[in-house]
Image (cartoon, grey):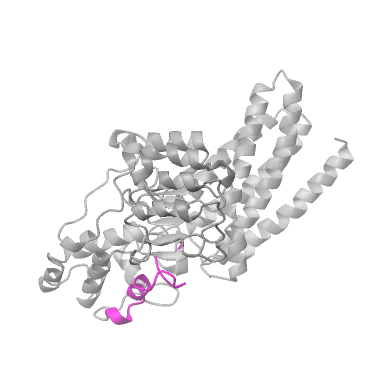
Amino acid sequence: MSLRSRMWVLGVALAALIPLVALSIFAPPDGGERAEFAQFLGRFHPLLVHLPIALILLVAVLELVGSSRDHLRRAAGFVLALATIAAFVTAGFGWLLAWSGGFEGALVMRHMWGGVVLAAMCVGCWNLQGRKHRVYPLALMATVGLMVWTSDQGGKLTHGSKFLTERMPQPLARWVGIKERTKADPSSFYVTRVQPIFDQKCVLCHNAEKFKGKLRLDTYEDTMLGGKDGPVIRPREPGKSELLRRVTLSLDNKDFMPADGKPALSAAETRVLEVWIAAGAGVQIADSAVKELSPPFEEKKAPPLTGDYRPQLQTIASLEASLGVRLVPRSQNPTDGLTLRTVTAPGRCNDTVLDQLAPVANLIVDAELARTQVTDKGMQALGSFSNLRFLDLSDTRVTAAGVRELLKLEHLESLNLTHTKVKSGGLSGFEGKTGLKLYLFESQ
């Protein structure tokens, strides 16, 4: 590439970098929620983020094996250019998601700035690679290192800050300087009964480094402090406590919490919060209030949705790699089951894939099969997904004959048959399925 062309490209890159840096400085994520369309666009960030990661790693591989192969070295330059473009686009969508989606906190800021600096470093590497500068290998190594660090920050945003360490063996944890986990004080009602509910259902979005709505729920003091709209707990007034109102709304209400499809609080968990607030919302409450939570109420807690998926992690990873589908935990609770996702490549999922998922069929609670190649034959395999609650078959070729196989699913709560070949009158037998939601828009 000529010097003139290179300067033109660098000028374009700088023109893109300046507004990205300016937005990060002068319009940082502040916990405010903005236009829904901005939030819609921002939610493409998790989809886009894998592209620059893959391309940057490919550049490193091409440079490593291409030291004696000029054609690979030239290919590395082209891939690096694509990685640079992808890094800019991904960082821009990431800023939009954080700025419009109600996020703030140190972890959000670190992840955002990691993405911005990564885009800038990709530009620098591209410029050095084309001129075969001797600093280039070091710059590329630094870029890969920054990418790994930024990805780790993003992983903590998605799965929680302790996602990589909470199951870490204690000898390894001590070696890397992580303090040994201590048990909660059994004398404190808040620590032993209330905080575990927040930790499991709320803290992922309301912690010290990522707090939506300026609300933190990772300590008693922050919980009582409230968020941007004031206190969310009003002692002795459960009916006026915003937190309790949010967690007891209907699932389709836009204010319902936990948001974004995370598992709702169980009846027992909601009851614990109600009794705690009514008793004064202190760290400790009166024994008479605690007795309200004694059996038989606690014996009525809903059973786990599935068995623990962790012993099957190796099988799950193997199936994902061989079948081209995703098997994603629905929450941090290992008995909340898995979600079968095919949205990134629906064409890969067919009846054979459903058959091959048999080893983990009992762990799948939610199957997203819209626009896939599944047919009535695949419904026979789905009939063995004994813990399936939510099933999306929209825009598939299934008919009423196949759907009848789903009558075996005792726990099914939602069945989407939008734009399928299921004909009127072909759902006999489903009338007795109490609580089942059927979606039949544009079906036959």
Q: Quadrant of residue 172?
A: top left
**Relative vertical location of residue 226 with respect to residue 353 in this rendering, above or below:** below
Instruction: Decide whether the magenta segment is chiefly helix, strand or loop.
Output: loop
Looking at the picture, how far across and down is residue 187, in whole percent? 15, 60
Q: How many marks?
A: 0
Left or right for 55, reference 173:
right
Q: Kindly identify the residue that appears in the image at 57 percent across and 52 percent down.
A: 371
Looking at the picture, how far across and down is residue 272, in whole percent? 23, 68
Q: Kindly identify the residue that appears in the image at 59 percent across and 44 percent down.
A: 347
Quadrant showing the N terminus = top right
- Stretch in magenta: 238-261
From the viewer's side, name the closer residue of 163 and 361.
361
Q: Does 10 lie within the magenta span?
A: no
Look at the image and tell me whether residue 427 can be seen.
yes
Looking at the picture, how far across and down is residue 420, in whole percent? 55, 57
Look at the image and tell me whether residue 261 can be seen.
no
Looking at the picture, how far across and down is residue 438, in whole percent? 44, 64
**Relative vertical location of residue 128 with respect to residue 341 in this rendering, above or below:** above
From the viewer's side, name the closer residue of 236 and 264.
264
Q: Kindly identify the residue that appears in the image at 30 percent across and 81 percent down.
A: 239
Q: Does 247 lie within the magenta span?
A: yes
